[in-house]
Image (cartoon, rainbow, N blue to C red):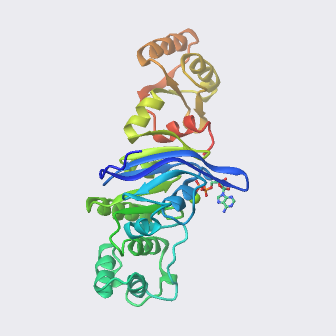
Amino acid sequence: MSDSPGTAVLAEGLRKSYRGSAALDGLDLDVPAGAVCGLLGPNGAGKTTTVRILSTLLRADAGRALVAGHDVARDPAGVRRSIGLVGQHAAVDEQLSGRQNLEMFARLSHLGAAARRADELLARFGLADTGRKPAGRYSGGMRRRLDLAAGLILRPKVLFLDEPTTGLDPGARNEMWDAVRDLVAGGTTVLLTTQYLEEADRLADMICVIDHGRVIARGTPEELKSRLGGDRIDVVVRERRDLAAVTEILAKVGLAEPRAEPAVRRVSVPVEERVAALGDLTRALRERDIAAEDIAVRRPTLDEVFLTLTGGRS
Ligand SMILES: Nc1ncnc2c1ncn2[C@@H]1O[C@H](COP(=O)(O)OP(=O)(O)O)[C@@H](O)[C@H]1O
Ligand SMILES: [Mg+2]
């Protein structure tokens, strides 16, 4: 395992079982310094377990991990000095205001100039004018931004964000995404977990898709889409009654089961070679006298890649 200074997080063969049942089953990770790595996976895939091991809250049964050059098992204090963690349930005191919370975190961390650091972070995340309002009365979006600010008190080299936008409305989610992008511009390495494909697509430089405690695919969002998805053909029929026949045709032309969306009269299928598939498709439509309103060849969405990889569970 290499521990070059260019690597912020390195994990090899991490295993963890809870009462005999494997949550992590040989998980490998390699996140370059300064990158945003999206750990994408369905509920129960092992995302939180991975973050807890990497942030020294939990010991792995086997495997090794280095965070900012420190071994999580041999030098947990070194790891803790280098990281920020924003968990699914952050440790914000609901009675205190945002400023009071941040000042408290700063003091607990023996950080000098706690008030100045608190002000800086409040301004950065649009919380400067929240005054003395207790955090318990913040909106969901404000609350998550406060969590993020708390995770940044110590200017960590590596920031772990466990499902940073779960439960947020689209507006608050966008604000959170902007906040994370700002961070990265400042050089912080981010490992974020998410169940949202769109989130990984928007934020991550690299994505590791995990399922059943192991990485089942990795790459940039674009690489994953092209390597695993291939091209897709969408057919929109004029008459809804033709959907079944088109589904049957696409089942022969495509690589996998076609997906029908009756509401929009569309059937979609991944194909191996788009020109040949398009030829077969138009011939079959003509033979059966089916009128298509539209035929499109396109790249798959990350959603479709994910569905393919996890066998339809999400
Ligand atoms: N404290 C625990 N005790 C027993 N099983 C657990 C515990 N934490 C997680 N698990 C199990 O380990 C697996 C992975 O969980 P987790 O890492 O929380 O997944 P994710 O964060 O991707 O949803 C799941 O099957 C979950 O039920
Ligand atoms: Mg989780």
Residue 91: x and y in percent read: 51, 77
For residue 251, which quarter of the picture?
top right
Residue 241 shows up from this direction: yes
Q: Residue at x 43, y 69 (%)?
A: 80
Q: Nearer the viewer, residue 67 or 116?
A: 67
Which residue appears at 60% of the width and 29% of the height?
240
Q: Is residue 130 left or right of residue 307?
A: left
Compared to residue 190, the image places residue 135 above or below, namely below
Residue 272 lies left or right of residue 241; in this view the side is left
The quadrant in which the N terminus is found is top left
Task: Please tell me whether residue 131 is drawn above or below residue 239 in the rendered image.
Answer: below
Residue occupying the far bottom of the picture: 132
Q: Position of residue 82 (x, y in %)?
A: 37, 66
Residue 76: x %, y % from top left = 47, 66
Q: Residue at x 46, y 71 (%)?
A: 144
Picture layout, residue 29 above or below residue 127: above
**Between residues 279 and 196, which one lies in front from this camera angle?**
196
Residue 52 image position (x, y, % from top left): 54, 62
Q: Nearer the viewer, residue 217 or 194?
A: 217
Residue 203 in view, yes or no: no
